Image (cartoon, rainbow, N blue to C red):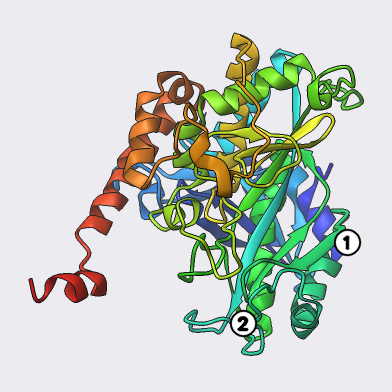
Amino acid sequence: MVKDLAKWAKEKGVKYFMVSYTDLFGGQRAKLVPTQAINDMAVDGAGFAGFATWLDLTPAHPDMMAVPDPSSVIQLPWKKEVAWLASNCVMEEQPVAQAPRNVLRRLVDEAAKEGLRVKTGVEPEFFLLTPEGDKIADPYDSAEKPCYDQQAMMRQYDCISEVCDYMLELGWEAYQNDHEDATGQYEMNWKYDDVLQTADKHSFFKFMMKSVAEKHGLRATFMPKPFKGLTGSGCHAHISVWSLDGKTNAFADKSKELGLSDQGRNFLGGIMKHASALAAICNPTVNSYKRINAPRTSSGATWAPNSVTWTGNNRTHMVRVPGPGRFELRLPDGAANPYLMQAVILAAGLDGVRTKADPGKRHDIDMYQMGHTVKNAPKLPLNLLDALREYDKDKTLKSMMGDEFSSAFLKLKHKEWNSYCSHFSKWETETTLDI
């Protein structure tokens, strides 16, 4: 734990700190603070006009202070004189309840009161594009089935290996990188951690990946579905729950189905119970629904769910249980807010534990080929508006995420949907001009 940031900076050769917070839409906002001023900022925070970012605030609101969390400090591996700090938003000495990191912190505390310590690992997928963002960066990456393509991976070796080296340097225990199922698409993995630490790392990873890509003349995007016909970018979450000391996996029980304990089944039951509402947070953009409701891609499969089902080690369902003591939620995509994604998983799972929710029947079929045979599984929302309506109807989940947050999120996301609806597209002209 870093206590004296100025002293730490002197030892590390850091000249500036990026005091950063994440808004409701996942945008990372920061002020660059010289080391000489950081200890004061650590107490009082850096001042922001909240209305100027995606938060439901007005120009008349007082300054919103981003108070850095010293435990989150990361020295930028690619620019050692700068360090990054995740921050908690405060206004008039009270936490801003709608701020994503505050939403997650509150739910972590609620889980701890019930003896639960939730850990997650994330699998962020992304594309490497040309700087203009209109096509993939590697013109030779054109295979019909490009997943795990070693030649394509090596052509982007300099960029991918640099980021992996940095994760190893930071102690994240990075363990694999691969070319994913779409041309130009990659995934990088590091070890799971407590949900708040995972969210901080996930947030920093996106910043780092974009920064290093720019350094190499590329553009990294986490957009869920940047290209028609290609597999979209997910951000699967592997979830387990532990005792407060972190030594005992409360989800693991070898005597139970798939090695998942009764408590693990209840947590999963909460995810299944709230799945349609979860989509609003895990799939938060108009573009998100081009991924989870996509037709067959050029590789032969979307690798994304469209129904609320669970299974064993089978990647065609929304949730799979790949081994004892954990499960994988395949719903989230690359646009998911790192903090809200973890928060909504916690909220749904915690409700499942409290109500002893049953996840329902397990299906072990290929959902892409035989999904039509499952008659009682809800379909995931078809678009962002449907997802927002499902979230608004889910009174329990809204309350657990916080009334102030839920109100702000729904207000701003409905505004975004209305903006999309008022946009005129090329498709409309092509299909309607001669009617």
The vertical placement of 267 against 431, above or below, is above
Which is more N-terminal, label 1 or label 2?
1
Using the image as rendered, state which of residue 168 and residue 143 is in the foreground.
143
Quarter containing the C terminus = bottom left
Total numbered circles = 2
Residue 368 horizontal side relative to residue 8, left or right:
left
Q: Quadrant of residue 228?
A: bottom left
The residue indicated by pointer 2 is 218
Q: Which numbered marker is on residue 168?
A: 1
Residue 331 occupies which quadrant of the picture?
top right
* Amino acid type, callout 1: Leu
Residue 67 screen position, x and y as percent: 60, 43
Left or right? Give the position of 210 relative to 252.
left
Q: Residue at x 70, y 38 (%)?
A: 320
SS type, badge 2: loop
Residue 387 screen position, x and y as percent: 39, 39
Residue 256, above or below 435: above
Looking at the rendered structure, the secondary structure element under dot 1 is helix
Left or right, residue 397 beside residue 199: left
Q: Residue at the location (27% across, 48% down)? A: 415
The foreground one among 341 and 75 is 341
Give me the residue at 25% from left, 75% from top. 426
